[in-house]
Amino acid sequence: MQVVAIVISFVLTAIAVPMVSLTVAKMLKVLRAGQPAVGRTDQPVARAITVVKETLVHTRMLQWTWVGVLHWFAFAAFLVLSTAVAAAFPQLFNPEWTIPWLGTFFLYEWVAEVLGLLGTLAIIPLIVYRLRNLPSKKGRQSRFFGSRMWQAFFVEAMVLLESAAILFIRGAEYNLAQAHGGHHADHATGFHFPVSQFFGNLYPTGHDSIGTLENIIFAIAAFKISSAMIWLIVIATNITMGVAWHRFTAWFNIFFKRESDGSTALGGLTPLYLNGEPIDMEKMEDLEEEDFMKLGVGKVEDFSWKGLLDFTTCTECGRCQSQCPAWNTEKPLSPKLVMMGLREHAYTKIPLLDIPEDQRTEEQTAEIERPLIGDESMYGVIDPDVLWSCTNCGACVQQCPVDIEHVDHIDNMRRYQVLVESNFPAELNNIFKGLERKGNPWNMAPRDRMKWADGLDFEVKQVGADIEDFDEVEWLFWVGCAGAYEDRAKKTTQAVAELLNMAGVTFGVLGDGETCTGDSARRSGNEILFQQLAMQNTEVFKEMKVKKVVSTCAHCFNTLKNEYKEFGIELEVVHHTQLLNRLVREGKLTPVAPTDGQAAGKTITYHDPCFLGRHNQVYEAPRELLNVIPGASFAEMPRSKERSFCCGAGGARMWMEETIGSRINVNRTEEAVATGADQIATGCPFCRVMLSDGLTLKQSEGEAREEVEVIDVAQMLLAAVKREPEPEPEKSVEEAAPAEEPKVEEKTPADDATESNG
């Protein structure tokens, strides 16, 4: 038995180790083919701490609590029990061998056995969960739709076998030590074998069983080694097997994530880079045609090495897919399938680039020339409908346990399509023209930007007309294009202005000096137009000494806060719900309870705008405002906060027709209506438009009450603040008449004497 175990173990090892080494070398070569990734090595200590938190503490995995807990035990078992596999090699020659000092240290023994037990018990429900959610049973509703199931089951089976093996081999070691007696038996106690002592009951005991026990140990050691080597052989022959390779690559992917502070790659979009350098308008004008053709991502090798590492690390878990608003409304976009498709293409194409052109086969040439974006007729890697279905909501990035930066990759591909190919949805032509000519996507006249203030009973100060610069007031009230031109959003603008005025906050506006922040231009891939708009605004900010900005638009808020720093300006930017909440807390705004003669309190639900919530983690301020409105009750939607469902307007989708699948805004509206709320509150004009349209549709179909309305948080607060206080109750005639003072009879000295004698 010992000889057979040694031969099998070393033959498999001799095959597996070179295979894995060659595969790792190939993987590194593919990663090196990527472009430079800027800002990925700063603050190494902070990055290392993030790695510890996200791996050892499992902070991101625990977003799905019970799955995260079970995965932690499987993960920990894999790490710790790898040492047990290494220890199996010496055991082929000496069954009593153990790791010097560590192997007999009780803490290691306890950790190894407990993790062996819990790793075994944890992987079983995970296997059951996967079986219950097979795509063959649940179709697109399964987050594993499109994942390669055999690979996942193979990995889970290996975890099960390796976790259980430690208990079986330790049980044999326990019996063997007792059989030898002496100092061996002193160690063979329940204290050193807390779990495996019970597995010892499966084997013979006593001095006569020593040979049998040794053979059992040889066999189990060979099994541990063989299963580990088979696992390595399988992953070596499947370089795109992310469900296995992420065990090694995730550590690096997390360390090199975009944000060194450990936050997700949300908020601002990654700048446009060329050869590792950020490209601004000045540099863009000097580009040679060859370099201009490299703007954005047009080929898989145009991704940065971090992008290629992202694709490599994708575990195919499908968390991103389960949360994606496009996928959940029957559209072809799945963030997971995009990563998988790019990974397959990268590991197929990039090695072929080393083959001389005259030596390539037709199939190899076709793969090299395969367009990154193209429909089935073009044999494209990513279908255009997939690319343009993205709302940039960030749900995929928020959910990903290994920090893949889906949104940046999608928008970089959009940049190439717009800037180089001029290939984009026709509807975007209209907003591009409006932004270029009039500074707003509605194509409205700049002189009309102040019309929202008509009818207000106080003066709104405009820079250049009423104030010289923003040193004279505290805040720039950034009205935004929607707030200036869209009828529903104008009501929000008026409400915020009234509230600020009532609270005594000094503010001013830019009026016709304001132009679009460029969010829709950038998110649709038109980086040139975005930079033109951003540069125009930042010059105005610098000239007018703008330092503090309040915005009612979540998209403007995000762009000003996170992206304008690229243009040399640092601003304190707050959302209007944050500032209003602060004013309520300070007692400068006081909501008044409704009286009997006023409308009774209503039930309110709140929709989290993606660019306020997920992108900037502003969740509590709007809710705190809604909860201080007297007489109102709050009903939370099932999908809220980090898991909120998109309205469908982000990523420039506000301006594009939605012709595939069901409508995202209708999906969200149905969820809001199902809460039974009378009012659907939000904090973004884009969300308000989308939800209002969805509500109108549901009301026309008789599936929503006519009195339900979509309204901004600011308008709700204003209504509460402007209520007349409840009048003092009228007093009755008796209550109104002054009470008679009790009469006090004067006492004579004789009376006093009588009382004292009595």
Image: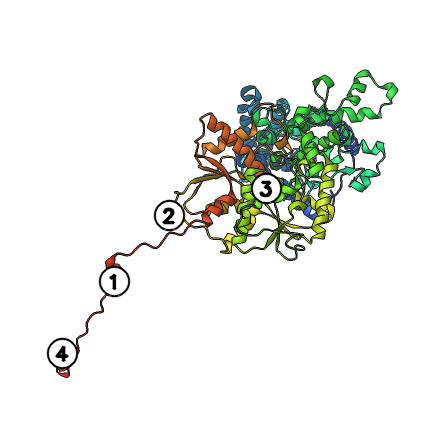
| The quarter of the displayed image where residue 93 is located | top right
Dot 1 or dot 2, earlier in sequence: 2
Cα separation, mark 1 vs mark 3, equals 56 Å
Q: Amino acid at mark 1?
A: Ala
Cα separation, mark 3 vs mark 4, equals 85 Å
**Residue for badge 4:** 755
**Residue for badge 2:** 595
**Front disc: 1 or 4:** 1
Are there few (<14), some (14-19), or many (20+) residues within 10 Å of tag 3? Answer: many
The residue located at (72%, 44%) in the rendering is 536
**Front disc: 3 or 4:** 3
The residue located at (50%, 30%) in the rendering is 696
Residue 648 x, y percent position in the rendering: 59, 32
Dot 2 or dot 4, earlier in sequence: 2
Are there few (<14), some (14-19), or many (20+) residues within 10 Å of tag 2? Answer: some
| The quarter of the displayed image where residue 654 is located | top right
**Residue for badge 3:** 483
Cα separation, mark 1 vs mark 4, equals 36 Å
Cα separation, mark 3 vs mark 2, equals 32 Å
Residue 225 x, y percent position in the rendering: 67, 29
Dot 1 or dot 4, earlier in sequence: 1
Numbered badge on residue 722 = none
For label 4, the SS is helix
Are there few (<14), some (14-19), or many (20+) residues within 10 Å of tag 4? Answer: few
